[in-house]
Amino acid sequence: MSKSAINISWRWLAAAIFFSMALTGLIMGVSLSERPSVYSADILTKVYYSLGLFVVGGLDLGTPLGGPVLGRTFLWIAYFGAPILAGSALIEAILRVLTPHKWRLHRIKNHIVIAGSGELTITYLKALRDVDEKVSVVIIDNQIDKLREHELRVQFSAKVIIGDITHSYFINRLNLTTARKVLMFTEDNFQSYDAAHKILKRFPNLKNKIIIHCNSIRFMRSMNGSKVANDCITFNSYQLAAIGLTNGQLIKHLYKTKPKDVVVMAGFGLFGQAVLEELSQYAKKEIDTIAIIDKDAHRRVLVVDEQLKLKDFAKREILEGNITHPEIWDKLSQNVDLESSEPIIILGTGSAEENLRAALWLKDKYPNALIIARSHQPSLFAQEIGQQYNINSVSITQLVKDNFPEDWLTS
């Protein structure tokens, strides 16, 4: 039972006790100085006077007179208890309106605080509620539209606060001393690190319990040596998705096939770069050639080389252009054998439509290839198309949900 339900239950019990005492006193023959006729009144009249004690106390009824001592005692207890109970409920309601955040959170314990209300928060909450339906969740964000706020409250039983996680006013009202974890899922990378720094200064007990999502892998890597990064857990959602894809499908294919494989990254954004990083760590000896196709391929490869030093990872083919243009694939086939081998072709641009269309064309052209088409959100349509044409349809959101570390979801 929730704390609010317990709070309501004891009030109703107290109200029933005071009402019963008042009614019992009147039934036992106690009279009232301003309503002497109540002694001979019917039961409904006595019920009405007993209920009136919660509104105006005994001011309109006068004081108890006559009758047995026990009856007068019951009535005097109800005279004091009923208006006090009603007044306390009114004061509590006023406090809830005037200071909702503090009132709502002052008793919360072992809770999870999430800064940000975007899609990553929704994905995390789905994974969390799969394993823990009861843990309290507090979500704070600068702006939340009404539909999203309703979804968070109703579907995930979350407490929602409109505010800035970097402000000390809100930090001090989240009861972080007893928090299980704090997750920084804001859209502003600097704000996430800044808020984590302030929270650790105020609540050092949260060391290694703050999880920061950084939209920019470059910024995240540049912060790796900072104290706040060392005292927190930092990640990027594309990296999490890449870990899931690599461990779930790519490594199995690479170890199954002989000789060394060709891996084609058609689309080399954050997701493609994260997949390449995972392959370089766990399947380097199984890859002969990495082919990269992207509209901005050369610049993006230079950035990866600068940060990850992957120049000697495998042979390379870099082509700049649109992945849906047949000429690009013709150029690639002149230097890389895609027909007699079993290559991995990852269609990972930001357009699910382009990825799926190119995947269908390539599967017909290279039937032995393991072809993976990326979408952002899970799609039953894409999954059915994939099953029909033997294409692997993967969702970034689903990969992230399935690959949250267990200790991020449990105590």
Image (spheres, rainbow, N blue to C red):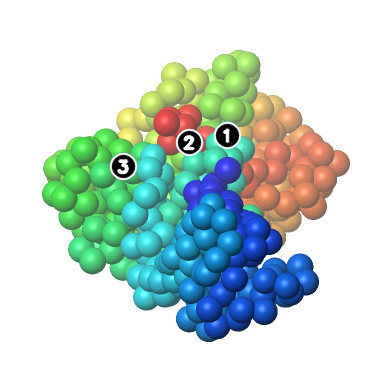
The amino acid type found where label 3 is placed reads Thr
Kind of element beneath mark 3:
helix
Identify the element where label 1 is drawn. helix
Number of callouts in the render? 3
Residue 71 in percent (x, y) is at 57, 57
Image location of residue 92, percent across then percent down: 42, 67
Badge number at residue 178: 3
Whole-number angstrom distance, CA of label 3 to CA of label 2:
17 Å
Q: Which residue is rendered at x = 62% and y = 16% of the image?
A: 256
- Identified by mark 2, the residue type is Leu
Classify mark 3: residues with Cα within 10 Å, few (<14), some (14-19) or many (20+).
some
Amino acid on which the number 1 mark rests in the picture: Val
Q: Please tell me whether residue 40 is drawn above or below residue 307 in the rendered image.
A: below
Measure the C-alpha gap from mark 3 to mark 1: 21 Å
C-beta proximity under 8 Å, tags 2 and 1: yes
Residue picked out by circle 2: 409
On-image quarter of the C terminus: top left
Q: Which residue in the rendered view is the most extreme toward the right? A: 388
Viewer-side residue, 74 vs 392: 74
Q: Which residue is mark 1?
A: 131
Foreground residue among 93 and 30: 30
Compare marks 3 and 2 and give the one earlier in the sequence: 3
